[in-house]
Image (cartoon, rainbow, N blue to C red):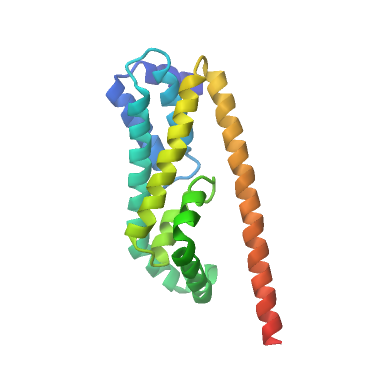
Amino acid sequence: MIDRLISWLAGLPAAEVYGVIAVLAGLENVAPPVPADTAMALGAFLSSQGTAVTWWGVYVATVGANVATAIGVYRLAATAGRDFFASRLGRKLVSERGMRRIGRLYERHHFWGIFVSRFLPGYRALVPPFAAVTGLPLWKAAPPMVLASGLYYGILALAAYHVGRNWEDVKHLLGGVSLALALAAVVATAVIVALVWRHRHRLRGDDG
């Protein structure tokens, strides 16, 4: 399937290739199973094959679309998301107390929390909506999102370009990066669960 996609993209004008990559990169914030890094790696690979596609164009298309949809999700969550979490179902998913706690964490650690989370699969798409729902203003949420996307996709695009002798090399690189980030996400989840459990245990002890 990927080989067919590469062949199809290679036959398109550069502007259309950038458009396809932008669509795929932007969808990550709406449909997380669509990986922006794979779309970017495809473009970087094509740029190393002597096509009209350039590394810089791929980078701009990926980061621009990814950041734009992240901000779009933020704005949507700032209205519809708040209404949802204020509803009965929303309060069952995340209590008012829990939402206030998340809001305090965002307020205290918003820059590094958002920056690091945007590298981790599973967390990446959750960052913009929860930042909006907890009331973190866009001028605080956007800079770490932009910086994380710019740094991550810049490094990945350069790496994919320089190992782009064949798609198998790029796929191997992408698989290694994805595995490392997935393991980091698992560790982060374990730490969060442990902290929440300890906090709840301490509260029960205080009540007793």
Residue in the picture at 37% in, 51% down: 143
Residue in the picture at 45% in, 25% down: 42
Quadrant in which the C terminus appears: bottom right
User: Where residue 7 appears, x then y in whole percent?
Assistant: 43, 16
Q: Is residue 131 above or below residue 151?
A: below
Residue in the picture at 42% in, 58% down: 129
User: Where residue 72 appears, x then y in whole percent?
Assistant: 33, 51
Q: Nearer the viewer, residue 128 or 6?
A: 128
Q: Quadrant of residue 148?
A: top left
Left/right placement of residue 116 relative to residue 194 reads left
Residue in the picture at 38% in, 24% down: 55
Question: Which residue is situated farthest in the bottom direction here?
Answer: 208
Residue 28 visible within the image? no
User: Where residue 173 appears, x then y in whole percent?
Assistant: 57, 27
Q: Nearer the viewer, residue 17 or 161?
A: 161
Residue 42 visible within the image? yes
User: Where residue 3 appears, x then y in whole percent?
Assistant: 49, 19
